Every structure is written in structure tokens, then in C-alpha cells.
Amino acid sequence: MIRIDNLVKAFGAKRAVDGISFSVEKGEVLGFLGPNGAGKSTTMRIVTGFMPPSSGRASVGGFDVVDSPLEAKRLIGYLPENAASYPDMTVRAFLEFVAELRGLDGAARRKAVHRVVELCFLESVLNQSIDTLSKGYKHRTCLAQALIHDPQVLIMDEPTDGLDPNQKHEVRNLIRELGSSKAIVFSTHILEEVDAACTRAIIIDRGRIVANGTPDELHAMSDSAGAVTLQARGATEERLSQLGRVEKLNGAFRIYPRDKASAGQLAQEVVEMVNLHGWKVEGMYSERGELDEVFRRLTLPDTVKR
Amino acid sequence: MRVIWTLAKRELGAYFTSPVAYVFLVIFLLLAGFFTFTAGNFFERGEASLAAFFAWHPWLYLVLVPAVGMRVWAEERRSGTIELLLTLPVAPWQAIVGKFLASWIFLAVALALTFPAVITVNVLGDPDNGMIAAGYVGSLLLSGAYLAITCMTSALTRNQVVAFILSVVICLFLILAGFNPVTDLLVRWASPSVVDVVAAFSVVTHFDGFQRGVIDSRDLAFFLSVIGFALFATGVIIRSHRAG
């Protein structure tokens, strides 16, 4: 549905987006990660037709966003950063306005408004003007706007920004649900959202893609992927270091596999050693790998890298 | 067309849900009345016409039209709703025309509310109503020209005050280029042909005909081309922002 090919966007001498290519198909939820200023919003603005690219192409549903912008825009639902909407309008008037611009009329419009109001829990504020709403409601109003024409492509710039934990949870569930029938791209810098909602994630830094994979693949890029954390009475660092490099954590040990190939057997080896020495196990976990660490390693400037 | 009307309806709604619209209408009518009856010596003229009323319009609009139009694009940019608007299936020119029309309709409403002046002269005497109608057409076109210029300056900045000042300056120039005290001054240095060219850019020169009851195609063309040019420039400015 979304195809981006070698996209470049330069602001003066600075290249905000520097040769990004990827594609998203129906049924995929792509998480777009990266530090502030990495080029996430700029990429989304190009795909939604708000800004033309300096070079490269972007197309949605086969329509190039520069050559046939209106056709491309019809397919897209877009939640811009900060979820701006017209403060003087009521929620109902705003949604009807967007529905009308989307070409929905009469009964179809009423139905569409009703559907998104339910989907985004807006019944209670329907006749309130938007500037009197709390941030969470404003955000959901703008999300409802993006969903009003049941778009095939949904692009969201930080959809959970500024929401409370319950609302974040709801939005993530919504994204996951919608993901089965749409192509979704959303940006975030909250790493848990990758696991919570994405089928695939891209990490970008300074305008370039530095990682592209499923959440599991990204986890596996971490140093700690496959490591075993053991908390056991009697355990000693000396013995455990026979199995691999050992790190002492708060009352526990983390054993790193010698190499990625032996990672699978590490847990088994640890269990054998525990049995052999009769240690009393209080806790034992196999580490999936920390996205946090992968993210930092990939996006910190070279000078700060370990 | 439908898209333009949808956008214009929203804009008009925005005017009338805020108190600004009513404040504007009251001030406009008060000032129009003041200029006509007090500063314009309406009664001392001893003639049944609205000449005293229309003569002040270039000056009255100079402040009031930029006040109406300054928010049109500046506010969209400041609040970020421009990103929402231009990612909906709306062509930029549709948005530009829709917003312009909405503000112009608002100004037309304000102008229409001066109808008591028409009634007054009809009660007091026997005016040439065709001349008055031509005056209204001219006045509406004049406000449209100022408004289009204000749309343009509004697209230049996210600060409404800057948009206001810029458009007042540009409109002031368009008045002064044909304002008699200024042209009299120019005649001393420049040849009459140069003065005529400069005066041809002035709204005053072109508004004169309407006040005398003449709708000249050249005057019509002048106002429409100012509107067309300013709205085209608005489109260029908006595109250049997005191009970065």
C-alpha cells in the first residue's frame, strides 16, 4: 500500500530525510522509531502529501503523492503531530466537516461520524467545543477524524503522545485491531509500543534507516538477547563464569552466552549447574533482549558510543 | 466547488461563533456612520446621494479589512491545523479560494448592514439608486482586493499582527498612489505620463468610477486582477513553505 523509494528531504544544507526506502502492505503495523529530529515526522509529512520530497518517490495505493496527490490523500487517514484541530468547533461539527470534505453525505456521513465517535469514546463530549477538551479528548477527536472514512492507510505521528496510561492502552489496542485490515504506520519514541502494537519496526537516525525488522528481530540485536538472569542462594560468580561472561546485578547474576549460536543451550546449562551444586533458585529468567539498548546503540552519535 | 463551499462554510462559522465578528460589525457600522454623517458633511452637502458614504471606504477598509483577514492563514500555521487541512483531499487552491470567499461574504454582510443609509437618502430626497448600486459593487470589489492582499500577507507569517501591519502598508500604498495630495506632489518631479501610470495602480482611481455610477470594464478588471494576483501569490507562498 505504501511504497517509499530513496526519499530525500533537505531543509537548506540539512538533510532531514536522507535516502529512506521501505514499503508497508495491508495487514502490517509499522512502528517508526527514532530520536527527536531523526526525520520521522518529515517522512510522514511527505507520504501524506503535506510536503513534496526533495528527491525520491512516495506512493500510496499506487498513486504517487506528488503527481496525483488527491487520489493518494483519499486513501490516507492522518493524525498529525500534536493532533491539531479547529478549537472553535464542536467535536460533532469538526467530524462532520472532515466527513464532508471526504465526500461523505447524508446517511453515510451520519453513520461514519457515529462509528468513529464510538470507536474513540467521544459520546460524552460530542457537543463540546474542542478548545474546552482535555488533551486526551482532543487527541482522540483528531484520531476519530483520521478514521472517519475508514481509510486503507493510516498514518499517525505519535498517536499516544500526551495520553494517560489507560488511554495509551486503548489506543494501542485500537491500532492492533485496525492493523489486520489496513496498512498502518505510526511514529513513537516509546519503545514498549513496538511490542504492544507493531508487526514490524524501523529505527531511523539522522534521516537514515538503521534497523528494520520484526520486534523479535530487533530484540535479538541486543547484547543481552539470550542471556540468563539467575537469582539463587549459593550461586557464585566464579562457577557461573564457566558458562559465559557474568555480570553482577542487584543480588542476581546475568550470564551472557559466549556466542549467539550457543545462546539456545545456555538456560539448560545454567539449570544443570544449579542442580549439580544444589543452589536454591529464587528466580531465573531468559532475557529476550532490550530494545532500549538496541535503540541507544543504533542512534547515539559515534562519539558517545561505548 | 463542493469542497470550496464546505471550507467556506466552516470559515464563516468560525467568524460567527467568536465575538470578534460582532465586535467588527458594530465598529464597522459606527465608523461608517461617523465618517458619512460627521466627517463627510452628509447633511451640509444638500444632495440626495451616498457620495459622502462611499468616499471614505478606501480608508475605512484600510484598517478593518486586514483585521478580518489577518487570521485566515496565520492562524492555521500557528496552530498547525494547516497540516490537517492540506493532507485532506483538498487542493491548495480550493482552500485558498474557500477561505477568501468566506471572509468576503462576511465583509459583504457588513456592507449590506449599511442599508439604513440607502433608506435615509431615499426618504430625504430622490437619489440616483443606480449610482448607489454601482457604489456598493465598487465598495465590495474594493474590500475584496484588500482582503486578497491580506490573505497573501497572512500566508507569509504565523503572526497575525505582522500580517495585519504588512497588509495595511500594502493597501495604504495602493490608496496613496492615486490620492490627490500625493499625485499633486508627484507631478512636480515626474512627467504626467509617469504619474498616470502610478495612479493606475491605485484603488482610489478605480473606485472613483463606481462612485460616479459608472461600472467600467477596466475598473472591474483592475479589482479582479488584484484579487486574482494576490490569491495566486498566496498559493505560491503556501507551496514554498511546504517545500522547505
Image (cartoon, coloured by chain):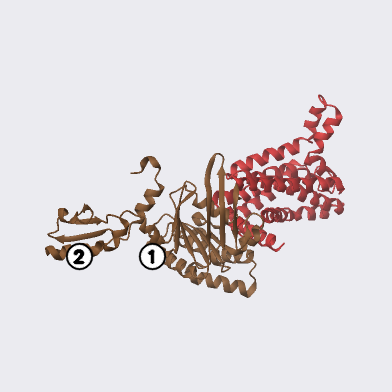
Chain colours: A brown, B red
Residue B114 visible, this orientation = yes
Under circle 1, the secondary element is: helix
Question: Image point 65% across, 43% down: which residue?
Answer: B153
Which of the two residues, A257 or B68, is positioned nearer the viewer here?
A257
Q: What residue would you read off at disc 2? A: A271
Q: Residue at x 49, y 72 (%)?
A: A118
Given the current orientation, which residue lies at the most extreme top position?
Answer: B189
The Cα–Cα distance between marks 2 and 1, rounded to whole angstroms, is 39 Å
Residue A166 badge: 1
Q: Mark 2 vs mark 1: same chain?
A: yes
Kind of residue indicated by mark 1:
Asn
Question: Compared with residue B88, is residue B45 higher up or lower down, i.e. above or below?
Answer: above
Q: Are marks 2 and 1 in contact (CB under 8 Å)?
A: no
- Camera-near label (2 vs 1) is 2
Picture quarter with the C terminus of chain A: top left
Residue A156, percent across and down? 50, 59
